Image (cartoon, coloured by chain):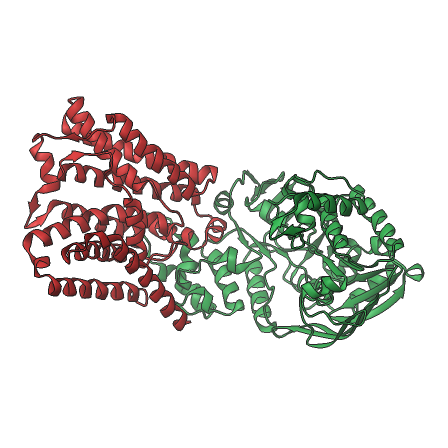
């Protein structure tokens, strides 16, 4: 498959990054650091997968960071302040995340408002709502809910629990995108919405579904973050939607839709997180964003140059 | 100052759009330029306005040769295009003086701008709110803004390409009055139109183009409509072998502003000039735009609110622009073909669905459609619909831009589909194509049926007579 080339290139970049970092600072390979890397790559992958599906369908979701924040906040608030069971609280938070995705998708698909604008509005609104909910304060678990916390902090078969969640999400999304009608329609609509419409495809329903999926995965990520920290803070998830976009782009998705793969997105999330980690380990944590931004720009510029030569 | 074109030649790709055309306009006259679809009228005007450079021949304005639209404007030649391309979000005053704003160190002098815009608009006989965005104006008003713009740039020669295409009757009358006034002021005006009656009414001379050649230059007062029609139509072509007769079963009934019945095995032509409403009719039938038609398929009334409804009811549309409306560029040829047929949530075997048709049309499998020739791309769009076996096939300009061989390939496919019992509508601006394929044709004219032609009446001149 010609398609896999981009993913292979990025996988190569990931390996080179990891090896270089390990050589510069051997503590990169320490069990704690590796475990943390896996945990963070998993969490980023989780919500980046939702973002990628939206992008493949020709949209964009800027509300992801705020949905993560709201989901963790609502869970904490219901369980700690209102005294609901942690399970009930988590389910309600997830339901809210899905409802948010549904509402955004409906406005975008049926009213024809641009996804950028709708999700930008939600981004501000939802983060504000999370702050209002708790008066701007942090809500910690104070040592309660060990079973729930295990989902964030714990390990299974030697790997952090979020890894297993991300693996499951990746398997399901990969299956959806590459083996089902839903996925084929997402690619078709993202590639040429007018031709898709004139081919009799349910363009609106599919657009809506991509935002529901993104809302759901962000909601799950929010639960895992609150389980890991274990507290909900109003600043949680700031700029995560942009990390998600970055992971998707690094993984080979075109922001115009129709191009990219699920595996690519996960590799993109890996490159992004290892870059962050490498800068920290080498001891210049202030440079984190500078380097990450540079990596993204170099990646897309090199990609465009190769594409030109190929034409 | 006069405009003179001599021996103009122009080709696009392999197609010769103009072959040695001479054309002149003197100050104070209105010259008509007429011709069928694709005769080369718009190309000639774009060359006069510096948009295209001729392959051979000369363009002289006064004593100079314009090499770009900017130079042409400076020399006094302004083109008012068929489809007005104006920035609709900018207001009226800004549009009139776009690119020529009075300013001091880059800061626009709004007062001066509005005064000049007002003066220019006065010359074209309208008072328009200067601060209203252009998008809120009617097509007629927008056209006035465009003409005012030309005058504010001190145009001496005005080229109007199909100026009445989007105007209502009274708006057209007002335009004619304005043109007469401008002519009186010494402007030279070229009036390009399909509409022979208008040309006969307001011009002094008429130049006729056919297939890129000048086939006549006539004094308007001594010319009749019939003369023009026979000049433009040229030799009547003998239709090729007749298609197999249709069956008796009516597959499609349409009632509304335009009404007709279509039988199994029948190929109905939709003829008419560009802008006559052919595409609008087909897209309306297919649910791709709102329409007031009531439609029955196989005798059963259907409501078509979206293309999805239409596909379910057994209709299929091969759209005008196969690239931007017919194909998914990022999916392989096979996946493009199988797309409308996929029904189950788990993907079915696309190779098995698309394979037989792909082989029948000799199309490659894994390539993306962008790598194919125009003819093969059109076959992909046709194959895409054949996998769902629609009862009715709507074809909008099915062979536009195809070479002779690809064209006859597509025609063969269309005939085969009719023989297999499909009902087919072919919209085409080429009367040859209508004559070669169809059992009969409706000629559209300004969104209405101008007339119906039986197979043995499908000639250029009949189509022009009913459509122009």
Q: Which residue lies furthest to the bottom in this view?
A: B56
**Which residue sits at x=28%, y=64%?**
A4
**Residue A49 against residue A141 in the figure, above or below:** below
Q: State the residue in front, B427 or B62.
A: B62
Residue B291 in the image, given as x and y percentages of width and height: 61, 40
Q: Colour of chain B?
A: green
- Splitting the image into 4 quarters, where does residue B89 fall? top right
Residue B75: image quadrant is bottom right
From this view, report whether residue B7 is shown above or below residue A64.
Answer: below
* Residue positioned most to the right: B222
Q: Nearer the viewer, residue A98 or B69?
A: B69
Q: Colour of chain A?
A: red
**Considering the image in quadrants, where does the C terminus of chain B appear?**
bottom right
| A243 lies left or right of B316 | left
**Horizontal and vertical percent for residue A10?**
25, 63
Q: Position of residue B397 (x, y in %)?
A: 61, 59
In the rendered image, the vertical position of residue B22 relative to residue B385, given as above or below: below
Residue name at image x 34 percent, y 38 percent: A123
**The residue positioned farthest toward the top in the image shown:** A82
What residue sits 78% from the left and 42% below the top?
Answer: B126
């Amino acid at each position: 498959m010609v398609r896999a080339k981009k993913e292979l290139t990025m996988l190569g970049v990931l390996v080179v990054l990891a090896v270089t970092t390990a050589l510069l600072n051997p503590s990169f390979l320490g069990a704690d650091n590796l475990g943390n890397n896996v945990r963070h790559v998993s969490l980023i992958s989780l919500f980046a997968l939702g973002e990628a599906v939206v992008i493949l369908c020709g949209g964009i979701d800027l509300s992801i960071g705020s949905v993560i924040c709201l989901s963790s906040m609502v869970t904490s608030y219901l369980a700690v302040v209102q005294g609901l069971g942690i399970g009930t609280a988590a389910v309600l938070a997830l339901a809210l995340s899905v409802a948010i995705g549904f509402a955004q998708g409906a406005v975008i698909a049926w009213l024809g408002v641009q996804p950028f604008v709708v999700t930008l509005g939600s981004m501000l609104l939802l983060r504000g709502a999370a702050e209002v909910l708790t008066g701007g304060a942090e809500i910690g678990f104070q040592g309660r809910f060990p079973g729930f916390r295990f989902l964030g902090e714990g390990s299974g078969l030697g790997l952090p629990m979020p890894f297993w969640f991300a693996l499951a999400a990746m398997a399901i999304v990969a299956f959806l995108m590459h083996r089902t009608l839903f996925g084929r329609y997402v690619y078709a609509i993202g590639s040429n919405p007018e031709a898709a419409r004139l081919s009799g495809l349910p363009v609106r329903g599919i657009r809506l579904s991509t935002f529901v999926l993104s809302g759901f995965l962000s909601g799950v990520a929010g639960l895992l973050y609150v389980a890991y920290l274990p507290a909900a803070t109003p600043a949680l998830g700031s700029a995560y939607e942009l990390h998600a976009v970055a992971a998707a782009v690094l993984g080979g998705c075109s922001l115009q839709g129709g191009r990219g793969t699920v595996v690519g997105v996960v590799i993109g999330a890996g490159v992004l997180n290892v870059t962050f980690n490498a800068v920290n380990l080498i001891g210049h944590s202030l440079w984190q964003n500078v380097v990450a931004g540079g990596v993204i720009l170099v990646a897309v510029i090199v990609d465009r140059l190769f594409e030109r030569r190929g034409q | 100052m006069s405009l003179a074109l001599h021996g103009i030649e122009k080709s696009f790709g392999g197609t010769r759009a103009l072959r040695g055309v001479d054309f002149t306009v003197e100050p104070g006259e209105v010259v008509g330029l007429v011709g069928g679809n694709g005769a080369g009228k718009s190309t000639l005007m774009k060359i006069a306005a510096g948009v295209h450079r001729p392959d051979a021949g000369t363009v002289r304005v006064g004593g100079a040769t314009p090499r770009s639209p900017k130079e042409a404007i400076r020399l006094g030649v302004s083109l008012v295009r068929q489809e007005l391309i104006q920035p609709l979000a900018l207001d009226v005053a800004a549009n009139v003086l776009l690119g020529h704003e009075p300013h001091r160190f880059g800061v626009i002098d709004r007062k001066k701008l509005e005064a000049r815009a007002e003066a220019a608009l006065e010359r074209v006989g309208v008072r328009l709110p200067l601060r209203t965005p252009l998008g809120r104006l009617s097509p007629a008003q927008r056209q006035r803004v465009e003409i005012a713009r030309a005058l504010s740039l001190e145009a001496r020669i005005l080229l109007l390409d199909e100026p009445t295409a989007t105007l209502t009757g009274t708006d057209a009358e007002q335009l004619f009055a304005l043109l007469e006034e401008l002519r009186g002021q010494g402007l030279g005006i070229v009036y390009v139109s399909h509409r022979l009656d208008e040309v006969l009414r307001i011009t002094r001379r008429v130049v006729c183009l056919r297939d890129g050649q000048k086939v006549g230059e006539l004094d308007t007062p001594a010319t009749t409509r019939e003369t023009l029609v026979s000049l433009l139509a040229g030799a009547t072509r003998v239709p090729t072998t007749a298609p197999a007769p249709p069956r008796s079963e009516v597959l499609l009934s349409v009632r509304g502003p335009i009404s007709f019945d279509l039988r199994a095995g029948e190929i109905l032509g939709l003829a008419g000039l560009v802008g006559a409403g052919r595409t609008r009719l087909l897209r309306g039938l297919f649910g791709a735009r709102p329409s007031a038609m009531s439609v029955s398929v196989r005798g059963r009334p259907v409501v078509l609110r979206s293309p999805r409804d239409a596909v379910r009811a057994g209709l299929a549309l091969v759209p005008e622009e196969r690239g931007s409306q017919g194909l998914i560029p990022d999916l392989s040829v096979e996946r493009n073909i199988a797309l409308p047929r996929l029904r189950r949530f788990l993907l079915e075997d696309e190779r098995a669905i698309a394979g037989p048709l792909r082989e029948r049309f000799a199309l490659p499998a894994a390539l993306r459609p962008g790598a194919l020739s125009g003819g093969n791309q059109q076959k992909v769009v046709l194959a895409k619909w054949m996998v769902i076996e629609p009862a009715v096939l709507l074809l909008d300009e099915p062979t536009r831009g195809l070479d002779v061989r690809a064209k006859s390939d597509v025609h063969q496919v269309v005939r085969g589909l009719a023989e297999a019992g499909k009902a087919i509508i072919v919209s085409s601006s080429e009367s040859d194509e209508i004559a070669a394929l169809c059992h009969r044709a409706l000629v559209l004219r300004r969104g209405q049926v101008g007339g119906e032609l039986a197979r043995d009446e499908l000639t250029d001149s009949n189509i022009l007579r009913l459509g122009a």
